[in-house]
Each structure stands twice: as C-alpha cells, then as structure tokens.
Image (cartoon, rainbow, N blue to C red):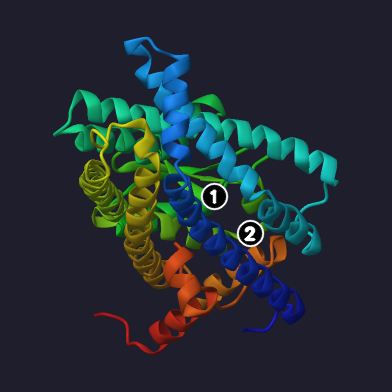
Amino acid sequence: MPAGFDERREAQARAYDRSQALLFLLRFALLFALAAVFWTSGWSRALADGLRGWLPHPFAWPLVCAGVAALATFGYEVALFPLSVLADYTLERAHGRLHAEFGAWLRGYVVTLLLETGLMAAAFTGLYVLMRLYPVWGWLAATAAYALLVPGLGEWGPSWLLPRVRPPVPAEDPELARELRRVGQAAGLEIAGAAWWDFDHQDELDDVRLTGWGRRRRAVYSAAAWRGLGRREQVFLAARHAAWHRHGAALGLIALQVALTGGVFFGATRLVDGAARARGLPGAVAPEALPFWVVALFGLAALAGVVVHAAARRGELRADRFALRHAGGRDALEACLRYRFARAPFAWDAPFWQVALLSKTPTPARRLAQARACDRTPPES
C-alpha cells in the first residue's frame, strides 16, 4: 500500500467487505435451500391450489402466478430477516456507514420489502406469461425485455436522459477542455468540453461520465469530483471512460451480458420444464413450479455473473492502461485512489474468491501493480 493511506481504516474496510461477502453468499445459499423446502414440503402446490380456489376464473391464471411469487418472496425475506438486520443494520452501524436508529432503518426495510415483493411478482408473472404465449421463443422475448430494461435504460438514463432532466453546469476551464480533446482523439472520440452536476444527493453518481451518443461526448463530473480533484486527476478519470468507448469495449460488454442472459433464460426454461414434467406438473408454466425457476434462474445467473465480472475487470484494467499512457501515469492513478479512500475507505486487496465471485472491478492493489509494470515497459514507438 503506498504512503498516504490509513492502514487502520483500510483494515476495517477489508473486514467489512469480507463480512458482507460471506453474508451475501450465505443468503444466496439459503435461497436455494428455502426453494427446496418450499417444493419438498408441498407448500408450493398447496399455495397454488389455494389461490386457484380463491380465483376460479380461467383468466385469473396470471394472478395466481403473481400471488405465488409475491408470497414466496415475502416468506423468503421474513425467514432471512435476522441476516438482513446483521448485514444491513448491525454491520453498517459498527463500521460507521449507517447512522440511523433501528426504527428508521426498519421503516426503510419494510418499504424495500414491499417494493421487492411487487417487483419479483411482476417479473415472474411476466416470465410465466411469455412462456405460456410463446412456449418455444419465450426465452428470447424475456431476453429482449431484459436488454431493454437493464442495459438499455442503464446506459440511456445517465447518458441521454439525466443531462436533460438535470442540465449540468458548463465548466470554464480552457486547459481542461484541451486535455479532454486530446485524450478523446486518442480514443476516437470528440469530447466537447466538461461540465459538472449541480444538485443534491449525488452519492450514486460516477465521478465522471461521458454523456451523449456516438463520437461526440461531454465529460460531466460529480460535484465532489469537480471540487475535490485536480485537473490531472479529472483528465485521468475521463480518459478511463473514453477507453471504454474505444473500439466498442462498452458495447461489447453489454452484448456479452445480454448474450449470457439469453443463455440463462434458455437453459432455465429447459431445466424447469423437464423438472416440472418429471414431477407431474404441466410444464414450466405451472405456478407451483416457482421453486424450480428460482433454482435454475439464480443458479445459472450466478455462473453468468462470474463471466461478466471477469470481462468487466479486464475492461477496467484496459481502461487503466489507456489512461496511464495518455493522462498522467501512475501518479494520477494513486491520486485518484487517495481521493476515493478519503471519501469512503476501501480494502486495498481481497481474497481471490471474493474478487472472482463478487467484484466487477479489480482491486486497487492489482491496478497499481499494473501501473508499476507499465512504468517498466518502454513506450511504444
């Protein structure tokens, strides 16, 4: 760890990350265990039969599906409530990341629980409907819906919609504009100046984002990054984002994510249909087959997530290499890491399993090791 980092705070952050990772994996494992109990106990069949008795109309089938999914989600969250308290309240308070009292936290938990229950009910009901309407191609329709809602809105919202809803403040810094144009040209982009967001509650925003479409972009910084970083670090961060748009790297990662999602839906459909029919159900569209859907979807999604995370980490390292060459070198990277650490302490390194299973970004130690290696590599002629 380079100088300027508080080792005590780093150790606390490392312990926090490890505890949260273990609790996440425990909750994930319990998801499969509870799904198995839900099926083997007969509760899944009993719940679906009971809802059919209350809703005898033949067109009420989507409501039966929604009811099974909603009640199963609610039951899962209630069963894991002690772990939620430990992970989301006790640990957060112990590490100084949460300052609310238990009553305020509990109210937020209940609101989140209701939203999650509604979202899961809607998602599984939509999946059931697609599979019933299109038994052969339903998985493809589900993949298209995912591509529209997740990668589509995830990119479209910050890049196109947010600047129109919250117009950023243009930056009056000719030298910064020149530096941004230079790194943009190296990445095949036209970065037309800089700006910064001027509104409250920016905790979820990136330090910088290249807004716009096509080759013409603008670097828009968070208020904290605009005020707390020097020009060299601001250019370095913008260069990293420009590298993601170089040669379509960002679009390639999105395409990989969508393709793997299609594989998840296709594989889960086949697995659930086979398992349901083997147990006397009419197939994957039976509402009581929800436990099979949970195991197949979340299991395959976890495997796909490992692949996507690995690709994202490689992309982040490529972005670092580009920024190291064109925007300040290792000193700029270390300065950016110090800025991040001062705002929210992080672990300098992590065990392999933690990175491979849960992390979309390489550890700071890995990033700095690459920077040192780049320093020893002669520049390209």
Q: Quadrant of residue 373?
A: bottom left
At x 72%, y 58%, the residue is: 86
Amino acid type, callout 2: Leu
Q: Of residues 173 and 213, which is closer to you in this image?
A: 213
Q: Of residues 97 and 176, which is closer to you in this image?
A: 97
Could you say which disc has been placed on residue 218 in the image? none
Q: Nearer the viewer, mark 2 or mark 1?
A: 1
Badge 1 is on which residue? 206
At x 23%, y 26%, the residue is: 132
Q: Position of residue 179 (x, y in %)?
A: 45, 57
Q: Of residues 132 and 91, which is closer to you in this image?
A: 132
Q: Position of residue 125 (x, y in %)?
A: 38, 28
**272 relative position to 43: left or right:** left
Vertical position of residue 94 compared to residue 293: above or below: below
Could you say which disc has been placed on residue 229 in the image? 2
At x 48%, y 51%, the residue is: 37
Residues packed near mark 1 inside 10 Å, few (<14), some (14 to 19) or many (20 plus) = few
Q: Position of residue 283 (x, y in %)?
A: 23, 36
Vertical position of residue 308 compared to residue 128: above or below: below
